Image: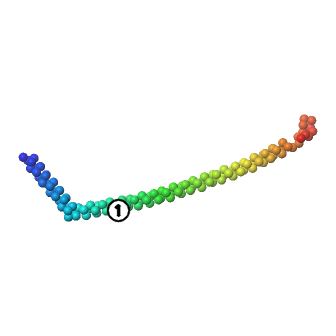
Amino acid sequence: MHENVWDRQELLFRIKLLKDRVEAFENGDQYVRMKKMHQIAREGDFETIKQLKRELSRERNEKTHVRELWYNTCLGIQRECEKKLQKKDKELDLSVIYRNSFQNAPRKNETGYLRN
């Protein structure tokens, strides 16, 4: 018997709750609240999007800056290598000229006379 009373009371309470919900939708109160909550959520989303765009822009700028630093460093290294290569080429040319000058020079044979 007591269970039926509680079940009935619970059902009456739920009916009243559902009627209130329907009435709130019918007179527009619930719609206004839902629209306001939606607007707040959208504004938060827009702010998040703006923040993410700013962060993306900063990351792109930093990436560009780092790429330029690496490029300049690589150019510097390449220039140093080219200078070293030019220096070595000159040394090689001088040594070849020096060696060729001795190879073409007249030599003394075993008897002490010059020969070509």
Count of marks overlaid on the render: 1
Q: Residue 92 at what x, y percent from top left? A: 75, 46
Q: How crowded is the residue under tag 1: few (<14 C-alpha within 10 Å), some, or many (20+)?
A: few
Horizontal side of 19 relative to 63 (left or right) equals: left
Question: Amino acid under label 1?
Answer: Glu
What residue is shown with label 1? 43
Residue at the image point whose x is 34% and y is 62% from the top? 43
Of all residues shown, which one is farthest toward the front? 26
Q: Is residue 51 above or below residue 109?
A: below
Q: How is the image coloured?
A: rainbow
Which picture quadrant has residue 33?
bottom left
Of all residues shown, which one is farthest toward the left? 1
Horizontal side of 101 relative to 51 (left or right) equals: right
Which picture quadrant has residue 44?
bottom left
Residue at the image point whose x is 51% and y is 55% from the top? 63
Give the camera-side residue of 20 and 96.
20
Residue at the image point whose x is 64% and y is 51% from the top? 78
- Report the quarter where the C terminus lies: top right
Horizontal side of 33 relative to 47 (left or right) equals: left
Q: Residue 66 at what x, y percent from top left? A: 54, 55
Horizontal side of 21 relative to 84 (left or right) equals: left
Give the camera-side residue of 38 and 101.
38
Q: Secondary structure at mark 1?
A: helix
Q: Residue 86 at what x, y percent from top left? A: 71, 51
Residue at the image point whose x is 29% and y is 61% from the top? 37
Q: Residue 113 at what x, y percent from top left? A: 93, 39
